[in-house]
Amino acid sequence: METYQRKMNHNRDEYRKLRWKQHRIQVTGLFDAVFSKKAFVDKVAIVGAGNCDDLDIEYLATKCNSIYLFDIDMESMEKGTANLPERTREKIQLIEIDVTGLDKVDFDHHLSSMLNRGETAKGIIRYLKDTENRLGQLSERVFANYYNDFDIVATSAIYTQLFYNWVRSCKPLSEKRCRRDEEWNFGCKG
């Protein structure tokens, strides 16, 4: 998962920031709603910061004393913040951390193996629920040093990254599976 996330973060073209402008405006609107209750806070945490191009960090820096960016890919966070004004960079702390915990439970390998061997939907759902329980326990340990430290905690579209590679690679598997097992409906028509 870590290798995949790095590849996704580094596989960005120079126009991505421009294409994400409207998204950044919408995210800023969400932060505006939060800051309407309290105009200035001490600490903000952004979980899954990645390239830092899908939110307006300069704007956030005007609303707080410090910003903590959490991501598995330190290099991308460093590149994403390198060209920010110095007054903004001075407020930023970069924290390299696997915010999902999926690498720790070898999720990629287990799910891929299940799909490759044609596991039933019931088996996969059971595995996903078990993984959810394990990740809940893991996240408490991973973030133990940071609980109650922040005034605002926001996640940065992590869900779009988590299963992107499986969605792309599972279509042929799901079509094959649909022909063999009506219980498996992912990608099936009708």
Image: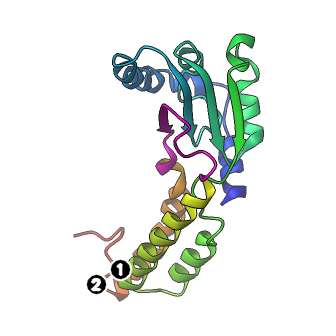
164 on left or right of 5: left
The x and y percentages for residue 27 are: 43, 26
Local packing at callout 1 (Cα closer than 10 Å; few below 14, some 14-19, many 20+) is: some
Give the answer, above or below, for where 108 lies relative to 116: above
Name the disc covering residue 182, or none: 2
User: What's the CA distance linking mark 2 and mark 1?
Assistant: 6 Å
Report which quarter residue 188 is drawn in. bottom left
153 part of magenta stretch: yes
Which image quarter is the N terminus in? Answer: bottom right
- Camera-nearest residue between 136 and 5: 136
68 part of magenta stretch: no
Report which quarter residue 14 is drawn in. top right
Q: Indicate the amino acid at tag 2.
A: Glu
Give the answer, above or below, for where 147 lies relative to 29: below
Give the answer, above or below, for where 4 lies relative to 105: above
The x and y percentages for residue 123 are: 41, 85
Which image quarter is the C terminus in? Answer: bottom left
The x and y percentages for residue 175 are: 40, 74
74 on left or right of 35: right
Report if the CB atoms under discs 2 and 1 are less than 8 Å apart.
yes
Coloration of the structure image: rainbow
Which residue is at 58% across, 22% downward?
57
Which residue is at 54% across, 19% downward?
60
- Camera-nearest residue between 6 and 143: 143
Identify the magenta region: 143-159
Q: Indicate the amino acid at tag 1.
A: Cys
173 on left or right of 12: left
Q: Which residue does the numbered mark 1 point to in the structure image?
A: 178
- Camera-nearest residue between 190 and 131: 131
